[in-house]
Each structure stands twice: as C-alpha cells, then as structure tokens.
Amino acid sequence: MPDNEKPDVHQKALSLNLDDTIFGSFAEIGAGQEVARWFLLVGAASGTVAKTISAYDKEVSDQIYGAGTRYVSKPRLQAMLESEWEQLLAQLQVTRGADTKFFAFVDTISARNYAGTNDCHGWVGLRFLRQPGEAPSDVILHINLMDQSNAQQQEAVGILGVNLIYAAYHALGSAKKFLASVFEELGRERVEIDCLEGSGPAFAGWNQDEVHAFLVVGGYAEAVVFPADNQLVPPNELLYKRALVLAPGKFDNATSVYTHLIDDTLADLPEEVLDESKGGLGLFCLSVAGGSASDMEVSIQESLRHVVMLQKLGHGVMLFRAQELYTMSAFVNRYTRSRIHFAIGLTVLLRVLQDSYKGLAGALLEGIARLFSNNVRLCVYPMTVEELRRRITADQLTGWRWTETDGMVSADRVHPAGAVDSLYQYLLESKFILAKKNAPTMKSQAD
C-alpha cells in the first residue's frame, strides 16, 4: 500500500493481527460482537485475540462485573475494563509480558431497539500498553449512534472499535490526529463522540478541556457540555428529563447579569413544569459558529476562555457547533421532553426575527416554526434605550421601532418592519415570547 494511502478497517484489523507484539481481549455488550468480528474475519486472529466475551444477560453481567450500576454507563464500562484487564494479566503476564503490548477493549451499547424508542448511545473503552511493561493508558469515549437501523449501528460500532485500537498504536501524536483516525470510514451522520477521556502515559501531554472543545470545533459532536463543577460528562447524562433554561450569547465579558438571566428564569418556571421533570437546570450556550476565530486552534482557545469565564458565574456551559436557537433546542430535545426556556436579552430576540435563515428552504417562517415546535419559550428581558440603540447599530439590525417606559424597552414594546410585525404579535399573544418587565440588572444587559 502506498505511504500516502490510508488503510481501511479491513487492513487495520489485519495489520494488528499480524503484529505479534499486540495481544488482548474483547468484551462487548449491546451491539453484537462487531469489533472482535473484524479481527476474526480478516484472518490471523490468533495473533491478536486472546478472548472475546459478550455478557448480554443482566444476571450474567452482574456476576462478572458486579451489580449496582446502569448497564450502559461509565461505571459499568470501568468495571468491565478493570475486570478484563486483571484477568488478561493474570493469565498471560508471566508467559508473554516481557514482549507483549497488551490491550483490553470493552464497550456497552444501547443500539436501536425493536420499537425504535431508546436513546441510541454507548460507552467505549480501551486500556493498552504502548510498550511491554509500561504503565497502562486508558481512553474512554461516549458515543451517539445516528444510523436508523440496528444493523447499521452495529456496523458503525465495529468500525469505530477497530479504528480506536489501531489509533492507540499508530496515531497518538495529537488529539487531532487520533480522532481523525478513530473517525475514518465514519462521519457525524453515523456517530458522534461527545465525551473523551484519556489517562496514563499515552495521554500525558493532552489537555482534557481542549480535547473536549475540539470535539465540537473539529466536527465530531454537535455539542458538548462543561458542567459548573467541571466534571466532564456527556450531554445525555446532564440534560436527561430536566426543565432547561438556556442562555445563549456572545459573552464578551462576564457580569452578574448573565447569572441573573438564568436564575430569574429558573425561579419563574411553572410548578407543573418542574413536577413533570427532574428539576430545573440552567446553562449558558456558546457557539463556535458565532465566534470570531476561523483558525481551529484559536477557536478552541477562544471557546475555553469564555467557558472558564462563565463557569465562574455559577452555571455550566454548552458549546454548540451551530448558533441558531432552533438547532440548540432540537439538540436538547433528544434528552428531555420538558419545556425549554431561552433566557435572552432583547437584541437576541431581534436577531432571531431578522435572521435570513439561508440554510432553510422556508427562510424565516421555517426557522420560527422549527424553534417553537420544539416546545420552546423565549423569556426576553428588557434593555435600556441607550444599550438597545448601540447593539442595533453594532449588529446592523434595521427597521425596528419601539416605545420606551422610564428609559427601558421591553419585548412587547418593539415592532419589526413590515408584515413580520403581524407574526411577532401572534407570538407574543400566544405566549411563545414572554416579555419580562424587570431587567435582571440595571447596569448592563445581556447580548
């Protein structure tokens, strides 16, 4: 194969089988044994495969890996990884340890069920040695499976697993190179990686926050979350069945107004909304598409600067690839059916209604329909006349009229140009847009 030609998954599995220094075990639950199958299919599997196991039955799984955890979860994956690694070394360290780079590959997957009603996601882990006798390194991924059939999802897991093992031995130069290798022959339309943790000597030079941000900037996930406590988790765990208050913005500086936007809206959530959910949660929303940086590395650093700044205000941050509110709401609707409240300043509302929505065939009407069909309410806080004028000029918003009360302008006192005003009045009267009368702070208004 020419040096500039990338190996496909078949060639990757075969090359690992033919490398007599790499040897390990496979434990897969929930999407067949598609990773091990590749190594058995291509030939020379005895050169790599020490064992394959698939403990589908819950009682069998509990007996092997211990009870007390959800079956598709990080704790279950870690229990699998520890068990398989200990067993591998107990059986083979004495006879092969001096010249073998051991590995243990594990996954626990919720692939599409027969009714098509489940969240299709999973945890994938690999413990490996770069050199015989070295301390082990771990890499753990949370993945979302985007294919529409169980068979396609199984296939995607198989490809990703082979890619992961191959990348651990051949593509550890950087997170960018590693993820590109893991994603080969796949794409965001098939798999998302929204959480990645690396530990041990192989990942000693990696900055975990930078890697987390790169998942979005590099196109591997639609969104990732940085919780307030900075304990990285995938979005599905944080957002599941929560009543959400999302505060999107550019956040050029950190002021308490942003915290008040979220806190005031959380305090106003109807009791029935909270009772039907697992409680309220407020998050800031950043968009890499709305940033000023075109360079990938600069975009990562710029995003992280805003994340750190906002976390200090007491709430977590979601980093999105897109900047449209309808895209953000569609994403979080994967994980909650509770109403989503966007806590925004007045100029965010103006931008929503003046956006051309060039990516949608139905332009503004389709954008508005997509947004509010996701069970969304816009909680719009008022703004001083001076601040409103400044931001309208800066954002090149045109045609808006308003009336003020004591130097303040609220959402029910503004009017877009032309026939759009009729649509706007409908949204106000139908309470899709909630015009707040009191600003969260009088010193500065959120963008």
Image (spheres, grey):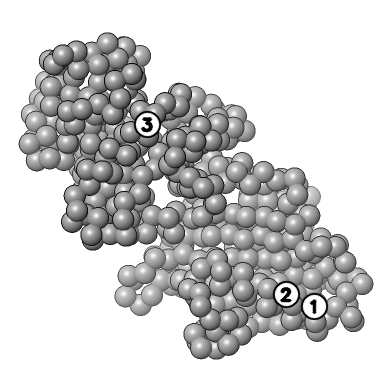
Q: Is residue 29 visible?
A: yes
Q: For mark 1, does the 10 Å Cα neighbourhood hold few (<14), some (14 to 19), or many (20 or more) residues?
A: some
State the CA–CA distance, disc 3 to disc 2: 47 Å
Q: Is residue 400 visible?
A: no
Q: Position of residue 151 (x, y in %)?
A: 46, 73
Residue shown at 70%/46% (left/top)? 206
Of pointers 3 and 2, the one earlier in the residue sequence: 2
Location of mark 1 (residue):
89
Q: Are marks 3 and 1 in contact (CB under 8 Å)?
A: no
- Say whether residue 88 is left or right of residue 314: right
- Say whether residue 248 is left or right of residue 233: left
State the CA–CA distance, disc 2 to disc 1: 6 Å
Position of the C terminus by quadrant: top left
Using the rendered view, name the quadrant where residue 8 is placed: bottom right
Q: Position of residue 212 (x, y in %)?
A: 57, 46
Q: Position of residue 200 (x, y in %)?
A: 75, 57
Q: Which mark is residue 85?
A: 2
Front residue of 260 and 61: 260
User: Label 3's element?
Assistant: helix
User: Label 1's element?
Assistant: helix
Front residue of 301 and 151: 301
